[in-house]
Amino acid sequence: MTALRMAAVAAEFGRDLEEDFQIAERLVKEAREEGVRLLALPEACLGGYLLSLDDTELDGGPPALALDGPEIRRLAALAGEMTVVAGYCEAGADGRRYNSVVCVTGDGVLGNHRKVHQPLSEDASYASGDRFHAFDTPAGRIGMMICYDKAFPESARALALDGAQIGVCVSAWPGSRTNAAASLEEDRWKRRFDLFDRARALENQIVWLSANQSGTFGSLRFVGSAKVVDPGGEILADTGVTAGIAVAELDVVQALDTARRSMGHLRDRRPETYDLSPGAVSA
């Protein structure tokens, strides 16, 4: 059995792409020094998130980067022998912009996901993705999603059914916009963020990495709370509401086998009872 040292980041990123790369380089270096082999950086860490979720962007939004462009190649070069996941604004070949997350090593791009579920007015700035899929990496088979995607059980379940051993969710998850708590520790949106992380890991019996923006950007105040969760829904490492790196080490294969030994949630499914298509549900 081989243990995997993995980490999820809570950090503040903005519009200045060069500054973002400097932050990413520092975080990758710090993770490498701790022996991390899988590192998750937040949503929109290359170019920043939106200034607000109310209307279209006042500053034009983050820079759109091509998946095969120089910025992603630069990220891959930073990753080297590590597997690194990072959020960015993708310039699609169809001319549209996507809120995306990419997985790279020094060998190049291993996987890419476009955010499917869009909260509030995010659809004014991004087009929506249309699928969830898992893929193989040196750190194991992983599946990626972005922020609001994790509020939908079907997202993580689709990844688990595609063989994902590790779910990686990158976020720019803010605190509540109404009745905001004085302390982010008491914020109700932070509680939801944490509950989703634990539930998605437990219900699918997979390892879960959750990265998030921290600090503030525009009108948004992010909850941080990057974490690593085991297949039983237990938090192994957590940054709290401040910036930091949550690092944990786990034998992923053994952890999944142990979690699924008695009650295997994927094994014990009854898909034939879940059909909600017209005519399938009796009156």
Image (cartoon, rainbow, N blue to C red):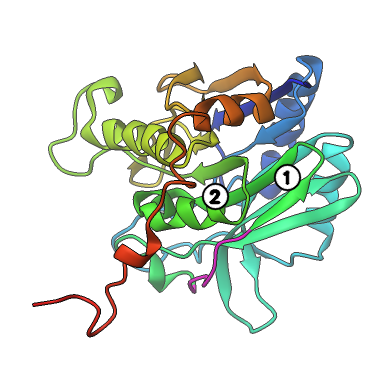
Comparing 66 with 276, the one in front is: 276
Quadrant of the image for the N terminus? top right
Comparing 57 with 156, the one in front is: 156
Give coordinates of residue 75: x percent, y percent. 79, 46
Residue 227 appears in the picture as rendered: no
Indicate which disc, 2 or 1, sits on the residue closer to the N terminus. 1
Give coordinates of residue 224: x percent, y percent. 44, 29
Q: Which mark is residue 262?
A: none
Q: CA distance from mark 2 to mark 1?
A: 35 Å
Give coordinates of residue 12: x percent, y percent. 53, 34
**Residue at x 80% of width, y 16% of height:** 33
Task: State the extent of the magenta-drawn residues as a range.
Answer: 127-133
- Structural crowding at the residue carrying mark 2, measured as other residues with C-alpha within 10 Å and reported as few (<14), some (14–19) or many (≥20): many
Count all numbered tags in the image, as a single digit.
2
Quadrant of the image for the C terminus? bottom left
Q: Is residue 117 left or right of residue 209?
A: left
Residue flagged by tag 1: what amino acid is it?
A: Glu
Residue flagged by tag 2: what amino acid is it?
A: Ala
Task: Kindly give the residue lying farthest to the left in the view shown.
Answer: 283
Give coordinates of residue 151: x percent, y percent. 35, 50
Which numbered mark, 2 or 1, is in the foreground of this view?
2
Q: Is residue 151 left or right of residue 92?
A: left
**Residue at x 54% of width, y 49% of height:** 160
Residue 152 appears in the picture as rendered: yes
Q: Which residue is mark 1?
A: 18
**Residue at x 39% of width, y 42% of height:** 173
- Structural crowding at the residue carrying mark 1, measured as other residues with C-alpha within 10 Å and reported as few (<14), some (14–19) or many (≥20): few
Element on which disc 2 rests? helix
Q: Which residue is mark 2?
A: 160
Q: Main secondary structure of the magenta part?
A: loop
